[in-house]
Amino acid sequence: MEAIDAHFVRRAGELCSGDTPLVLAPHQGRELLAYFDAQALSRHTDFAARQLQPAGQAFYTISSAGHESNAAVALALRPTDPALLHYRSGGFYAARASQVPGVSAADDILRGAMSSTADGISGGRHKVFGSVALNVIPQTSTIASHLPRAFGVALAMDKPARRDFESAWPADSIVVCSFGDASANHSTALGALNATAYCAHRRLPLPLLFVCEDNGIGISTRSPAGWVENLLRSFPGVDYYHARGTAPIELMRTAGDAAAYVRQERRPAILHLETVRFMGHAGSDAEIAYRSVRDIEGEYARDPLLATAQALLDARVLTIPEIIERYETARATVAASADRVPREYLRGAEEVVAPIVHRDPVAVARHAARSSEVRSRGFRDKMPEDGGPLTLAQSINAALKDVMAAYPQSLVFGEDVGRKGGVYGVTRGLLKAFGPDRVFDTVLDEQTILGTALGASLAGFLPIPEIQYLAYLHNAEDQLRGEGATLRFFSDGQYENGMVVRVAGLAYQRGFGGHFHNDNSLAVLRDIPGLIVAVPSHPSSAPGLLRQCAGLAMAEGRVCVFVEPIALYHQRDLHDGDAAWTASYAPPMQWPADSSSELGHVRTVRDGGDLLILTFGNGVRMSLLAAERLARSGIETTIVDLQWLSPLPVGEIVRIATRHPKVLVVDETRKSGGVAESVVATLIDEGYEGRVGRVNSVDSFVPLGPSAQHVLLSENDIVRAATELGEK
């Protein structure tokens, strides 16, 4: 028996009721009883997981013990309110499950902890608090990474555009998001709280209740006395509520007041909930290494279950024997759940990755070829295909209008995308065409931009956020890695957050801007399982790729990153005055007429029999110029634009490569971690028997000014590499 378990049983038997009964209304007595039952059930699931772990039957034992007072928050809300929960939210989960018939919190929690395929949310992939029936959106354990998403859900909740399509939640729902006191110091939490205060200052509707569960310690590091309260009180326009887990009646009243305020006023609030942590940080945490036995046992007096038991006794709702009986009934319920959990696990890699590799290409194609009758909504005068040739930037702008006209739930947002129309003019005119509810500027925080997208997608929108420069993405990449790309994985495909993240990136801006405006590495994106990365190279193909990304987001819930080569945005020529880098706009085509832009398809831009060049982005233009020089030397080249960099179009690469005796991969990213490494490895894996070479930029940050040419891949490098490959 765990020490805190024995302590509760002993102390509950010693409780004494006050001389004067605590007067509660009948409904308060029922709520207090439901509160205790949820607390007890959560506590015993923690005990069960700890007992099952040594036998190799449980694999995740971060305990909610001591935090069970968060059950009061669940009881103050509706089960239709979306919840994004801290990993110590067992009490909340148990209380919410008690509000929805047919849901067993004990079954759900233990199946997750035991990694059983019967787990209703992750299918045995991870222990998360999540349930579609309970509107609990599963989160990872990454510190505070879910707060920007919670902000995004709340921001989308009251958007007028939400009336134009069906939503998963009632119109007056509010969002609840819980996190720990140590996590409050994380930049991700601070960014989300700052964005919340920013919206409150602007009086934008934001029905969001943050709950900081303050147990006073982050693993082994104490939170300084008063620090968390001072921090949480410091956000202007965000109402602050405080409650103690050892005062259940006061807590339930305060939680109810906070929830009612957020629901009625559509304004954010913070509930600062004092809790205590029992049984260490996690099952592997040797708490005795940094805390004394006296300190650990001294906190047993703050047990929220004992506080609730005392209130039940004082209110004459239960007697001492009934309290203990109810506590033991929870133990028996949990034990029965543990016994019936199927000891069945995912049987292979295919089952593990199924949620993140699923495909529905027919549905994607239908979305990408949305009928043209709605397109006029985005174009005030004439269709772009009725005008002259467009640059890459202009073609992407027109494609954005197409997508926004086809999908009333689509949103374009980011830094400077509204009135300014983007740093490079790519979003120019969208604000005028679709209004500020659908095209808007955000705070200068990439975590908030991506979190807004993650949340808005859950609320039914098609987010198209812009990250101003590729180098800026690194401030917020965990929003894609730890939250966006993992949602289908952790929910077995039951939740998804499809979106198209536009990123201006790559190099070749003639020395302008240095590294922060010329980041030429895509490794961080290509390393994320399930994430899709597309790179357009020409105005003729960019619209189709963008519409495909929108289709992937809508039909498959995919997170797509559309990396737009800045240096090609306003390029018009291949040679001076030839306008070869412009093209007439390619409008949507009726399905299934056009498949050239589909995921897994490449684009052949030049034919020749001696050498195959596989490239993308700026490499396409450089390779075309290099090919003309090579032709004068008698080397004829085929040039293929890969278009899709993750996942790589393996089938097309192999099919085309087998028709050529030599393959050169032209990769403008760095040599280490670059795209070429994967392409070459793919050719080897697939048994390609010809000669293979690659040419990359140097492993360096991009310097400012003319020095950039020393580290970036050049036309001369391509010619030299192709010539050397031919001489081998």
Image (tube, rainbow, N blue to C red):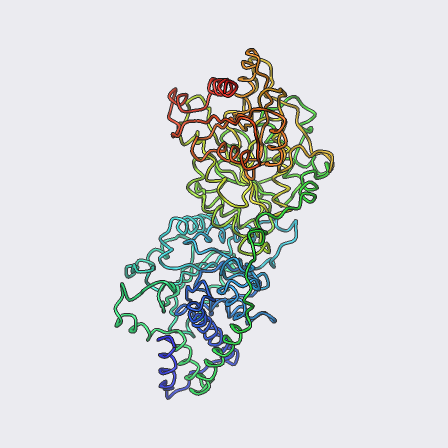
Give residue 41's position: percent from left, percent from top.
Answer: 48, 74
| Closer to the camera in the image, 645 or 427 | 645
Q: Is residue 544 left or right of residue 322?
A: right
Judged from this view, the residue extending furthest toward the top is: 632
The quarter in which the N terminus is drawn is bottom left
Q: Position of residue 668 (x, y in %)?
A: 48, 27
Question: Is 720 located above or below residue 653 in the figure?
Answer: above
The image quarter containing residue 43 is bottom left
Task: Give the quadrant of residue 406.
Answer: top right
- Point out residue 657 in the picture as x, y percentages from the top left corner: 60, 29
For this view, does 619 lie left or right of residue 237?
Answer: right
Q: Position of residue 186 (x, y in %)?
A: 37, 51
The answer to whether residue 19 is seen in the rendering is: yes
Q: Is residue 220 left or right of residue 67?
A: left
Q: Is residue 649 above or below residue 77?
A: above
Q: Is residue 300 above or below residue 639?
A: below
Q: Is residue 417 visible?
A: no
